[in-house]
Image: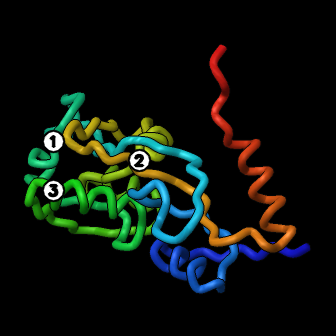
Amino acid sequence: MEISLREDNSDRLVEGVRAGAVDLALIGTAAATPDGLDALTIISERLVAAVPAGHPLATRPRVTLRDLGAYPIVCMPPGTGLRTVFDQACAAQSLQPVIALQASAADAIADLAARGLAVAILSDSMAAHYRDRLTALTIEDVEIPALLALVWRSPHSPAVRELLAYSRRAFAEPGPG
């Protein structure tokens, strides 16, 4: 039994799964299940804006997408789940924020925001890792959650079946009581 790990953006990983080049992918997405695939949602959470102390928005607990339009933005690149959620939310309101900087790692996004170069767009749990340097602000008009999900086409290999079974147990939501 052999498992290989490959890193890429979510859109390319989904296409790899659809084409049969990738058996299973961990992706960020705005849709619960990409068309033609099966999925197991691992995390579902809100997007937040993150700013350093002293930023004009830092004293507010909540912001809107329109509020963010007054500032440059740093976020994930196109093809990633967080960016898809942010872009869809902006498009729904006919907003075109200035994406001044892009990075594929949350650490880089947080560092750029902490230096005051732009407002970071992160998931709630990502932003929590940087609370020593950044204040997370709820974006109240983004209803679409950012999802982290495993996706697959058909679990034919024993390795994929075993990993899916393990993942279902590990990420199952606790029952009531």
Residue 122 is tagged as none
**Which of 37 and 112 lies nearest the eye of the viewer?**
37
Q: Residue at x 9, y 48 (%)?
A: 66
Q: Amino acid at mark 2?
A: Ser
Q: In the rendered image, which residue does mark 3 sit on?
A: 92
Q: Is residue 130 visible?
A: no
Q: Secondary structure at mark 2?
A: strand
Q: Secondary structure at mark 3?
A: helix
Q: Residue at x 37, y 65 (%)?
A: 76
Q: Is residue 70 above or below residue 8?
A: above
In front: label 2 or label 3: 3
Q: Can you say which quadrant of the picture contains the N terminus?
A: bottom right
Q: Position of residue 23 (x, y in %)?
A: 69, 75
Q: In the rendered image, which residue does mark 2 sit on?
A: 123
Q: Amino acid at mark 1?
A: Thr
Q: In the rendered image, which residue does mark 1 sit on?
A: 64
Q: Can you say which quadrant of the picture contains the C terminus?
A: top right
Q: Is residue 37 above or below residue 174?
A: below
Earlier sequence position, callout 3 versus callout 1:
1
Q: CA distance from mark 2 to mark 3?
A: 19 Å
Most distant residue in the top direction: 177
Earlier sequence position, callout 2 versus callout 3:
3
